Structures are given as C-alpha cells and as structure tokens.
C-alpha cells in the first residue's frame, strides 16, 4: 500500500521536482518505508511506499521492459504471480518480484485491456513516453482514492486531497452542491469533491490525459439484477462459501505480519474464522470498545478470539481520546467527513499497526447481502407505518408516501445529517442562491429507479454511494493514517458478483437480514455470534455531545469566524446550537466537523 502523486504539463512547461517532493511529503504516512520519483522536464511521478511484498526489489516508479511506460501504483494485485507467468511466456522480462512491474508490462502488452485482468485494489498512474500521455485508473469497487485537477493543460493528482492542495495551481473554491450533499448525508458525493476545481477518478474507471481533451473509460459497473436460471439455496451457499474462502486465501499473501479485525459482529467474525480454518496459526486479531456498555462489543470479540485460538488485542476508547482523534483525522480526509465511526476505525488500525502491517476486514457485506435495518423498509415500500423504528434518527419528512416516491423516500431515509427542516431554517439566502444556480438538488435519485425490485435498487444505490462515499473512504483514510494496509475479502470481484445477483429471498428471509451469509456463517461460527442483534461500529456520540464535548462544540460553532462563513443564517444557527438536547447530535457533529475543516483548509471566516 502506498501514496502516489504527480504533475504533468502537456504544454511542455517544466515541472518542479521540489513541488512534487512537497506533495509526497504530505503522503509520508501512507508509505513510510521508501520514496521514489520519476522526473523529466514536464512530467513528474512520485510514490511513498509501504512495503508488503517484494520487500527488497519492489521499488517504484516501475518501468515496462521495453522502456516505453512508467508506473506508480497504490494497492495490491492478488493475481500478479499468474499474470507474471503469462507475461514471461510472452517474452517480457522482470527485474523484481513486485505486482507493480506486472501491471506496467501488462499495459505495455494489452493496452486498455489490462484493466479487466487485474484482481485487486488499486489507484495507478501510467505515463507513456512515446505518445506523451498519462493514464489514471482506480479499482472497480473504489477502495483506493485518486484526486486530480485538470487545468490549463496541466494535470496534478494525488492519493489524498491534502497532498494535491500543496500544488499552488489547485484552487479552493467550495462546490455548493457537494457542501449541500455533505450537510444532508455527512459525506461528499463519490463523483465530486468539496472543491469545484478538483475531481476524483471514478471507481471502475480510467482517464487518459495528454495534448488533447481527457478521455474517460468506464471499465466496470455493479449491477444488482438477479441471476437468471434456477439455482437451489444449497448451491448458493456452496458457491458463496467457496468464493469467500478463495477471497480470504489470496488476501493472506504478504511478506509482512498479517492479522484480521474482529469486532464480534458477524462479518469480521466470519472472515477471521475462515482464515483460522485455512490454517493461520496464532492469527492476530484486533478490536476496540467503549466504557459505555451499549456500544461495547469486546465481550463477544474476546470470547470468539478465545474459541478460535487467535492472538487477540483490544483497547478501550475514552471520550477525550476520541475528540482528539476526530481533529487529527480532518486533514487526512481533506474534505468534510462526519462519520464518527471513523474514530473507532482509527483506534482499531492504530492498535493493529503495533503488531502487523496488513489486516483483513469485514466491510462490504451489508451492501452485498442485505444487512442494514433500512432494507426491510425498502423492500416493503410503501407498505409500512411512518415512524418505523430505525437505528438512528433520520429525516423521513413526509407523513405518508406514494408508490412513485421511492427515490425521494430512500434518500430521505439516508439523511441523518441536517434534515429538511433544519436546512430550511439554517441555509442563508446567499447559499440558497448558489444552490439554485447549480441546478436541481435531486441528483442520483434516478439510480434508485433502475430496478423494479426496490430492494435491489436500494442496495445498488448503497454500493455506489454509502459504501464508496462513507465506508471505503473511512477505511482508506483511517488505516493509511496509521501506515496499515486493509484488505476486504467481501469486495472480491467473485463475491461481489454473487451478492449482486442474489434473489430477494436470500437477502431478507423470515425477518433475517443477510440470510445467505448467515447460512454460510453457520459452518464457521457459534450461536452466540450468529444470534446476536446487528450492531454497527459506532461511538457514543449522543452521550459525549451533551457532556464532555458540548462546551467546545458550542464555542466553535458560535464563534464569530463560524457565524460569518455565509452559509447559514447567524441567528438561527445560534438558536439551533443553543437548543441542543442530544436529539440532533448527528446534525450538530456535521456542522462542527465542517467548521473545523474550514479552519484548516479555508482559513479566515470569509467563505472560500
């Protein structure tokens, strides 16, 4: 795992090596083991490397054997050894054992067909010396991030926004649409950033830059259409069991210590149990807990670790530690991100890094196999009673819904930042005008109409948004902040294919969420894990915000600097903050993180 950055001026103006080094300096935590640079007059590519495989001969940038292409790459390719053998048979020569050298030679041989052959997670840049072009690409699920700015025929890119912003050409004008989306959903949309001039390479996509206009290619999209043909439940169980075992086995490939996350929930427990069944002796496992009993899963994690015979490590997170960590995470995210579970992730990964360099996690299972409490609501829409119990406060808005309002309903169901009433009260006239100029605010709703089956529509939407905008961003930033590589077996291409093709009865069945996954898990896990009520990785935010955190949060949001930003009506913001009783904790946290982010990235109280 690594951090990459680069500058390419296709008007042939010289690129500063010092500027590139400055960008890489902001990525040191992603790759503390080694730095590499490729620099010629108008092109600069760089990498900070975390050594996981090819420890002694895997340095980057990596050249193709014919010398035409040069690559920097962040990630892991799990089938690189098989691809290497094919390339050797085709006459390609290798100087080391890295997967990076496989990628660049595969591209040299097959061109854009290289993408479909890669099995892994990656964000990469390949420079073609012959035609003076540069390709950026990301893995299908979007596990590895890649930000870029294309301006005045110059490309700047980096693994993190804070590194990209070190280049003086990158502009910081805030995108009002992205800001509004953040205030609703607590994250930035997958196809935008908080800054108007900065973009993200799309998951499953690539962009080629050169002397002409950029050319985008979408290589992969998830599709939640049910598989055709008859298949028995037993066949589905066997197929998923086999795919998960293969996914875990290939992700245990490393030349450094490796472990698993073990929260005590179904998903991480299953991944750990499979790894143990495959013969991983004294596997190291990691978990975190809280003093607040209702948020503490450690008893389950410890019991399962003892039963599986793992070398288990855990720790307790206190409120002061959590508050400090939340502030430390802000520059790494680079844009507003208000999921408090990132705090717990940070402590888990920090603990793990004291013992290993790589961990396997259980993320992605909920979006693939139907694990969220909102999915029965989606499946039954509109046949449910308003006010149905939910795991957290959400903005359902309407008292009743008609069948043609599913798209609006589901987005409202996901709104757990500022609800509609709060936005109506707080948004300033100036901010409303900016949003009106930007066009309709119902973006992405069309995606929820792709499938007649509403459950499939909701789950596909969550894969494209909830997973990519929240969960994968959190995993990447919180792990890389601690120089730790996280691998996600549930997001193996074969596992995604199975999950996305499941019939509805194998997702939700007789009140059981993630029905098929539970069937597989029965082969590996005890009843005390199987019969647990689902508990999301969460922190005791509501309790902390009415006690230990309240004074600083109120002082920050009611400061003259915050009140003068221009996005909110000052008097109404004062009323909103002053009346906080714990019921609007997520909304208040969303506002607080925004202000702390603006202090770091936008400076003074004037709107950027």
Image (cartoon, grey):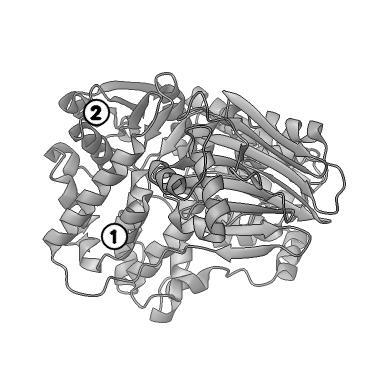
- Quick one: SS at disc 1? helix
Q: Position of residue 96 (x, y in %)?
A: 51, 32
For the residues marked 1 and 2, what is the alpha-carbon distance in whole angstroms?
26 Å
Q: Quadrant of residue 601?
A: top right
Between residue 28 and residue 49, name the one nearer to us. 49
Badge 2 crowding class, 10 Å Cα cut-off, few under 14, some 14 to 19, many 20 or more, is some
Disc with the residue nearer the chain's start (1 vs 2):
2
Q: Is residue 317 visible?
A: no
Q: How many marks?
A: 2
Judge left or right: residue 503 versus residue 31: left
Q: Position of residue 389 (x, y in %)?
A: 32, 56
Q: Quadrant of residue 78?
A: top left
Judge left or right: residue 484 versus residue 375: right
Badge 1 crowding class, 10 Å Cα cut-off, few under 14, some 14 to 19, many 20 or more, is some
Tag shown at residue 459: none
Q: Position of residue 437 (x, y in %)?
A: 75, 69
Judge left or right: residue 523 versus residue 98: left
Q: Quadrant of residue 449?
A: bottom left
Picture layout, residue 103 above or below residue 228: above
List the single residue furthest toward the right: 13
Between residue 249 and residue 386, name the one nearer to us. 249
- Quick one: SS at disc 2? loop
Residue carrying label 1:
498
Mark 1–mark 2 contact, CB under 8 Å?
no
Residue carrying label 2:
280
Picture layout, residue 209 above or below residue 328: below
Q: Position of residue 290 (x, y in %)?
A: 37, 27
Judge left or right: residue 452 versus residue 168: left
Between residue 573 and residue 453, name the one nearer to us. 453
Q: Is residue 177 visible?
A: yes
Residue at 72%, 69% in the rendered image: 436
């Amino acid at each position: 795992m690594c951090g990459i950055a680069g500058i390419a001026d296709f008007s042939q103006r010289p690129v500063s090596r010092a500027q590139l080094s400055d960008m890489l300096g902001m990525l040191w935590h992603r790759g503390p083991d080694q730095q590499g640079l490729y620099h010629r007059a108008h092109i600069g590519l760089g990498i900070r490397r975390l050594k996981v495989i090819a420890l002694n001969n895997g340095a980057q940038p990596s050249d193709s054997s014919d010398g035409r292409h040069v690559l920097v790459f962040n990630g892991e390719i799990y089938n690189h050894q098989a691809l290497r053998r094919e390339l050797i048979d085709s006459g390609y020569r290798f100087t080391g054992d890295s997967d990076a050298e496989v990628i660049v030679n595969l591209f040299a041989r097959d061109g854009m067909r290289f993408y479909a052959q890669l099995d892994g997670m990656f964000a990469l840049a390949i420079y073609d010396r012959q035609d003076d072009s540069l390709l950026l690409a990301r893995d299908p699920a979007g596990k590895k991030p890649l930000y870029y700015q294309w301006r005045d025929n110059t490309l700047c890119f980096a693994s993190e926004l804070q590194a990209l912003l070190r280049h003086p050409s990158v502009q910081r004008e805030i995108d009002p649409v992205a800001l509004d989306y953040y205030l609703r959903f607590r994250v930035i949309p997958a196809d935008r950033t908080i800054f108007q001039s900065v973009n993200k390479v799309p998951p499953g996509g690539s962009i080629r830059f050169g002397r002409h206009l950029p050319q985008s290619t979408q290589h992969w999209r998830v599709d939640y259409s049910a598989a055709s043909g008859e298949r028995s439940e037993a066949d589905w169980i066997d197929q998923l069991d086999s795919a998960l075992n293969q996914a875990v086995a290939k992700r245990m490939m490393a030349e450094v210590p490796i472990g698993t996350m073990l929260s005590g929930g179904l998903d991480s427990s299953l991944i750990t149990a499979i790894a143990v069944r495959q013969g991983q002796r004294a596997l190291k496992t990691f978990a975190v807990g809280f003093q607040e009993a209702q948020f503490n899963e450690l008893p389950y994690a410890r019991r399962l670790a003892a039963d599986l015979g793992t070398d288990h490590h855990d720790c307790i997170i206190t409120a002061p530690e959590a508050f400090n960590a939340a502030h430390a995470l802000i520059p790494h995210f680079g844009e507003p991100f208000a999921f408090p579970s990132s705090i717990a992730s940070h402590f888990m990964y920090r603990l793990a890094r004291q013992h290993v360099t790589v961990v396997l996690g259980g993320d992605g299972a909920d979006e693939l196999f139907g694990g969220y409490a909102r999915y029965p609501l989606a499946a039954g829409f509109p046949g449910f009673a308003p006010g149905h119990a939910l795991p957290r406060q959400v903005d359902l808005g309407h008292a009743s819904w008609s069948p043609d309002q599913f798209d609006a309903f589901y987005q409202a169901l996901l709104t757990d930042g500022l609800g509609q009433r709060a936005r109506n009260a707080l948004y300033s006239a100036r901010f409303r005008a900016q949003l009106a100029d930007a066009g309709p605010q119902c973006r992405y709703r069309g995606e929820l109409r792709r499938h007649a089956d509403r459950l499939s529509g909701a789950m596909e939407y969550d894969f494209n948004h909830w997973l990519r905008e929240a969960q994968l961003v959190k995993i990447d930033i919180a792990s890389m902040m601690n120089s730790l590589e996280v691998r996600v077996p549930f997001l193996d291409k074969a596992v995604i294919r199975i999950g996305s093709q499941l019939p509805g009865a194998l997702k939700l069945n007789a009140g059981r969420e993630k029905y098929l996954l539970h069937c597989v898990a029965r082969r590996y896990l005890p009843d005390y894990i199987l019969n647990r009520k689902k508990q999301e990785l969460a922190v005791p935010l509501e309790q902390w915000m009415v006690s230990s955190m309240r004074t600083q949060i109120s002082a920050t949001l009611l400061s003259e600097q915050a009140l003068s930003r221009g996005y909110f009506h000052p008097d109404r913001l004062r009323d909103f903050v002053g009346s906080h009783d714990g019921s609007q904790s997520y909304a208040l946290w969303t506002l607080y993180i925004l202000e702390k982010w603006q202090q770091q990235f936008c400076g003074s109280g004037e709107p950027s």
